[in-house]
Image (cartoon, helix red, strand yellow):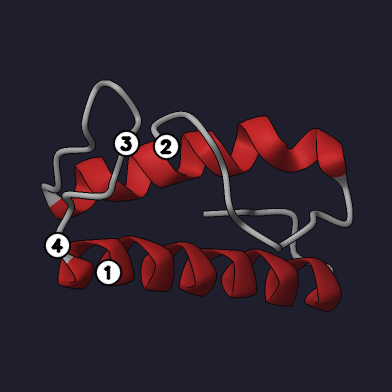
């Protein structure tokens, strides 16, 4: 099953796939979590996966709030 995606989530903007993937690696690095080289995360601890997802969500909400308030700074 490695390499197959079972996610039922669909992106509103499919071109955002690369940016979201890059954000996943950035957040994992900031948290000190090693993402497997082969991309298969089935052996990753649930706590680590949740921490990455939670921080990505937090960052996306911050970006949206800044865009709605008219602020140009993203980080």
Drawn side of residue 75 relative to residue 33, left or right? right
On screen, residue 71 above or below 31:
below
Do labels 2 and 3 touch, CB within 8 Å? no
Q: Secondary structure at mark 2?
A: loop
Report the number of numbered marks: 4
62 and 8: which is toward the camera: 8
> Is tag 2's residue or tag 3's residue first in the polypeptide sequence?
2
User: Which one is in front in this view, the residue at disc 2 or the one at disc 3?
Assistant: 2
Drawn side of residue 57 relative to residue 71, left or right? left
Which residue lies under the disc numbered 2? 1
Q: Residue at x 48, y 74 (%)?
A: 58
Q: Position of residue 15 (x, y in %)?
A: 83, 34
Tell me the number on the disc at residue 51. Answer: 1
Which residue lies under the disc numbered 4? 45
> Is tag 4's residue or tag 1's residue first in the polypeptide sequence?
4
On screen, residue 8 above or below 17:
below
| CA separation in Å, label 1 and label 2 | 24 Å
Tell me the number on the disc at residue 40. Answer: 3
Q: Secondary structure at mark 3?
A: loop
Do labels 4 and 2 touch, CB within 8 Å? no
Q: Residue at x 61, y 54 (%)?
A: 74
């Amino acid at each position: 099953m490695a390499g197959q995606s079972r996610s039922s989530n669909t992106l509103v903007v499919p071109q955002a796939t690369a940016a979201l993937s890059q954000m996943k690696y950035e957040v994992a690095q900031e948290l000190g979590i090693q993402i497997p080289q082969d991309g298969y995360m089935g052996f990753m601890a649930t706590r680590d996966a949740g921490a990455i997802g939670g921080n990505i969500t937090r960052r996306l909400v911050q970006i949206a709030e800044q865009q709605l308030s008219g602020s140009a700074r993203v980080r």
